[in-house]
Image (spheres, rainbow, N blue to C red):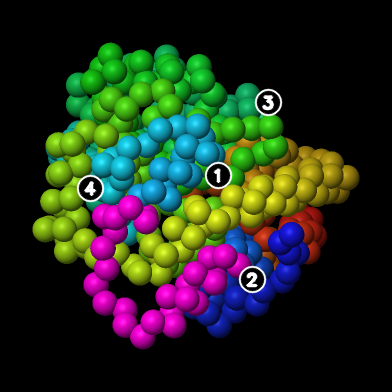
């Protein structure tokens, strides 16, 4: 039994969410529900593994291309998703976005289009723009609290020869959608028809609601596809800088290694990130189940609170992630005014949905990866602000 109710003081640890909230919101001391990490302690098995490694006094250059790491990934995918991952598909990357950036370089040229489904993870916009590619928005359809893919528009975009990549977010941040069999099959078929490469960011894959299951894209196809992901989102150690990319195509994998090792000199990974990943995948499946159960309860708290106190705010029910997408369009308050009230009156930091494009200007993104007490305090401050 794990204690997700424990309140851990993160102030003074140089953490982005608590110590640097002023950078984004212009005021310090706000109660933050912002960046997508959590306020939960990492599993005790992970901490124990790190302590064991810390007891060795040498922290030299390290290798990732070995069975200890690759077996842990292979086993996790087999047991959790009933999906076969070959060891030679697995490559280390310091971050998911680093891998996305390199794959964009490998599979497209400058001024080519990269399709993203908006509202979308804000780092997608930056990585496309900074690689001198064109952002092509496939805006998700929104109807009565539900998001779906506009396949008619997507097919038009995929048919343009200059659009070379679909950067998929699966499960989707910030809407919380888990793409179903039909949606994934259709995406793969359309991309195959138009020879468009798929980069699938699946970092939220383990965080799902009861009765829901993430479907890795490799369960459908391995042709012209790469998956980028990490254990860090699930087990809350993004500061240890360790992720991985799955690339079935040998030539693409070789090119990725060339960028990683020869161009950027990043072949030696974070020792602690690797040890944490191995321990998490080998020993902490029960922790993930309890985490998901706890997040389900947090969602119920938010639903009940909004229904009783803030009925004009609609929760887009998330099938995945710990990030809630709150529809505030019925408040008849501009987002600028709402953010001003949240900061000045509520003393709370909640992400402006406009950050994510699409119809995001009508939404707040509320991080519930925290103890229930903080979730409730945030809701009280939200109500006070309105």
Residue at 37%, 37% (x, y): give it.
Answer: 85
| Residue 59: % across, % down | 31, 79
| Numbered mark located on residue 144 in the image | 3
User: Quadrant location of residue 135?
Assistant: top left
Mark 4 or mark 1: whose residue is earlier in sequence:
4
Query: Mark 4 highlights which residue?
Result: 102
Q: Which secondary structure lies at badge 4?
A: helix
- Boundaries of the magenta span: 44-69
Whole-number angstrom distance, CA of label 2 to CA of label 3: 32 Å
* Residue count near mark 1 (Cα–Cα under 10 Å), binned few <14, some 14–19, many ≥20: many
Residue at 29%, 64% (x, y): give it.
Answer: 269
Mark 2 or mark 3: whose residue is earlier in sequence:
2
- The reply, left or right, for residue 277 in relation to residue 93 is right
| Residue 328: % across, % down | 68, 42
Whole-number angstrom distance, CA of label 2 to CA of label 1: 29 Å
Whole-number angstrom distance, CA of label 2 to CA of label 4: 36 Å
Q: Is residue 308 visible?
A: yes
Query: Mark 1 highlights which residue?
Result: 206
* Residue count near mark 3 (Cα–Cα under 10 Å), binned few <14, some 14–19, many ≥20: few
Mark 2 or mark 4: whose residue is earlier in sequence:
2
| Residue 122: % across, % down | 43, 48
């Amino acid at each position: 039994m794990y204690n997700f109710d424990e309140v851990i003081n993160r102030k003074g640890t140089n953490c982005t969410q608590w110590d640097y909230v002023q950078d984004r919101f212009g005021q310090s001391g706000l109660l933050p529900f912002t960046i997508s990490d959590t306020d939960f302690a990492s599993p005790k098995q992970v901490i124990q593994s790190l302590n064991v490694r810390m007891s060795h006094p040498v922290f030299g250059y390290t290798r990732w291309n070995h069975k200890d790491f690759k077996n842990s990934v292979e086993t996790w995918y087999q047991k959790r998703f009933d999906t076969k991952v070959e060891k030679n598909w697995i490559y280390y990357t310091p971050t998911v976005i680093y891998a996305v950036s390199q794959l964009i370089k490998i599979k497209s040229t400058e001024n080519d289009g990269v399709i993203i489904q908006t509202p979308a993870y804000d780092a997608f916009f930056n990585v496309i723009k900074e690689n001198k590619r064109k952002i092509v928005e496939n805006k998700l359809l929104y109807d009565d609290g539900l998001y779906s893919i506009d396949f008619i528009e997507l097919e038009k975009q995929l048919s343009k020869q200059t659009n070379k990549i679909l950067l998929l977010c699966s499960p989707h941040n910030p809407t919380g959608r888990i793409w179903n069999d039909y949606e994934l099959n259709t995406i793969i078929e359309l991309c195959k028809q138009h020879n468009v490469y798929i980069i699938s960011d699946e970092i939220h894959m383990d965080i799902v609601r009861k009765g829901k299951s993430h479907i890795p894209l490799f369960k459908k196809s391995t042709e012209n596809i790469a998956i980028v992901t990490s254990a860090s989102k699930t087990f809350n150690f993004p500061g240890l800088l360790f992720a991985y990319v799955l690339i079935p195509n040998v030539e693409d994998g070789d090119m990725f290694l060339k960028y990683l090792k020869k161009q950027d000199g990043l072949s030696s990974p974070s020792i602690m990130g690797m040890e944490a990943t191995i321990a998490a995948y080998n020993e902490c499946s029960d922790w993930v189940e309890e985490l998901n159960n706890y997040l389900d309860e947090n969602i119920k708290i938010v639903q009940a609170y909004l229904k009783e106190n803030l009925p004009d705010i609609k929760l887009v029910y998330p099938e995945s992630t710990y990030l809630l997408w709150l529809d505030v369009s019925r408040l008849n308050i501009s987002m600028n005014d709402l953010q001003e009230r949240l900061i000045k009156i509520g003393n709370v930091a909640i992400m402006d949905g406009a950050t994510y494009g699409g119809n995001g200007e009508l939404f707040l993104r509320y991080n519930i990866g925290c103890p229930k007490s903080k979730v409730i305090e945030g809701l009280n401050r939200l109500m006070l602000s309105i």
